[in-house]
Amino acid sequence: FLVYYPFMRRFFFVFSFSSSILCGVDVGGVTVDLRSPTYRDGVLYTHEGGVVKGDELRIQAREILYEKQGSVHRLEAEGDLMVQYKGRIYVGERLEFDFKTRSGVVYEAKTFAKMWYLGSSRIELRPDGSY
């Protein structure tokens, strides 16, 4: 006995299409959610945007390179970059972040501190939340 529901066909098509272009991976407390990712030699990469979340960390960018293999656990991101780290928001051109040391660098960065907007060619993110 088979019942055909045309609306279910559309739902299934949209669901299967959507799930093929998004990739969500949870690696050691870090969730990597990328659009149309490419994986090769331990490196996950996209140029179509994505979000990476961890403890007190959220990174959103157009291009993301995520690597976790052996003693390396790092991320590089650029383009439409926004970083939320330890309660502070940073925007910039490019980010390099090391998950092992919980530190990184935002290039051409801007942030807000009390009543001041701060900008620099380079802002270092430290494990204790200072910069």
Image: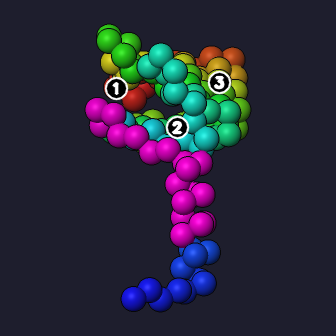
What amino acid does circle 3 point to?
Answer: Arg
Residue span colored magenta: 12-29
Q: How many angstroms separate mark 2 from mark 1 (CA)?
A: 17 Å
Disc number at residue 128? 1
For disc 3, the marked residue is 94
**Nearer the camera: disc 3 or disc 1:** 3
What amino acid does circle 1 point to?
Answer: Asp
Earlier sequence position, callout 2 versus callout 1: 2
Q: Secondary structure at mark 2?
A: strand
Residue 52 at x, y percent in the picture: 48, 39
Query: Between 117 and 20, which is closer to the camera in this rendering?
Result: 20
Residue 107 at x, y percent in the picture: 65, 20
Q: Secondary structure at mark 1?
A: loop
Q: How many angstroms separate mark 2 from mark 3 (CA)?
A: 11 Å
Disc number at residue 59? 2
- Label 2 Cα neighbours within 10 Å, binned few <14 / some 14-19 / many ≥20: many
Residue 117 as seen in the image, left or right of residue 26: right
